Image (cartoon, grey):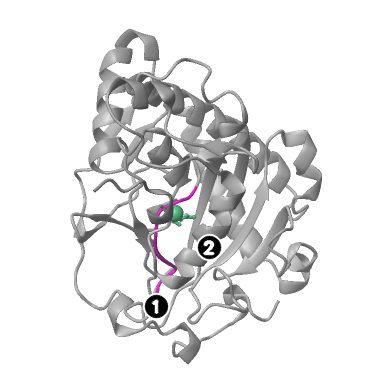
Amino acid sequence: MEKLISSKHNIQHVPESYILPPETRPGKEAILSCNCIPVIDLHGNIDSNRQDLVQRIMEAAQEFGFFRSYLQFIMLELMNKTVKVAEEFFQLPVEDKASVYSEDPRKGCRLYTSIDYDHEKVHFWRDNLRHHCHPLEDHVGDWPGNPTRYRDVIGNYAVRVRELSFVLLDLIREGLGIESGYFEGGLAKLQMMSLNYYPPCPDPALTLGLPKHADPNLITVLNQGSVPGLQVLKDENWLALQPVPNAFVVNIGHTLQVISNGMLRSAEHRVVTNAYVARATVTSFIQPSNDSLIQPANVLVDRCSLPRYRPFRYDEFLRTYIKDAQDGKAPLKQYQISRT
Ligand SMILES: O=C(O)CCC(=O)C(=O)O
Ligand SMILES: [Fe+2]
């Protein structure tokens, strides 16, 4: 528990073990804000402008691997409440969080810090609570019971965000020309909720909340609250993705990049810290079951090109993803089929 960054109070200097090597430090250079990430508005009747939505999502997913998406206004209240509950959880006294703290990555509901604290060379400036959330009734009993509204708010939110994820996945499926029902089996079976907490950092130039990475799963829907910190890599430049109220940030994971046979991009991103305010974010990952076979969709291979990736099991990929991330290697490289 003492490893948690939120347990450390009045830190005046960045501890040595959190200082990144110069080549991966964010430094003091100003980062451009990115207003170019497309906004996909899902208000109202999706079917009345479905073609247009499909086209805009496909363009965004190919060019950036990221887009923002708005839903009904009713979501704004739930989005704000969710980030507030996340903040409340991380700000609880240490003894109230102890029951979910674990250093065992196999635990289904787990509070921990950084990424792999005992094995990594440098630590990251974040605490994380993650747990499964689908089907809700199988998992909600493992979640924190404190704050008292935690299960109610996060449970509600998980269901709504899962619905949104499936609307988006279906539009993407259509854009790729893949048969309907493709994501109804194991490929989108699991939903993991991941709550991040990045406390203020005395010197944000030296640290990161999360290093450069792309997500391994299918599709990610992020509620980044109102405090900036997320940056996206585009043409070798970092761009800051400013929070927009009522808009989720959506990104394509490695699994969807493979299924699309490389047509869609799983974009790299990172999280910077700031010196003034704590930042809480809530991420929902739609991910395959461990035994799912991940491979380019048949229709994409038959129609226009040879497969660019060999088939692999999702749990095999997760193991190599973690190792490759630690060694600074591109996680999909070893699954790529090279043709010379
Ligand atoms: O907290 C954020 O802004 C991004 C989190 C993220 O990239 C992740 O959880 O994979
Ligand atoms: Fe991420």
Extent of the magenta region: 207-216
What predominant SS class does the magenta segment belong to? loop
Residue on which disc 1 sits: 207
Which quarter of the rendered picture does the N terminus lie within?
bottom right
Q: Is residue 316 magenta?
A: no
Q: Is residue 201 above or below residue 160?
A: below
Residue 32, image x, y percentages: 18, 59
Disc 2 under 8 Å from ligand 1? The reply is no
Dot label at residue 322 = 2
Q: Is residue 56 left or right of residue 257?
A: left
- Label 2: how many Cα within 10 Å (few below 14, some 14–19, many 20+): some
Pick the residue in front: 162 or 329.
329
- Label 1: how many Cα within 10 Å (few below 14, some 14–19, many 20+): many
Residue 90, image x, y percentages: 62, 64
Q: Are marks 2 and 1 in contact (CB under 8 Å)?
A: no
Residue 339, image x, y percentages: 28, 45
Q: Residue at x 74, y 57 (%)?
A: 107
| Cα distance between the residues tagged 2 and 1 | 20 Å
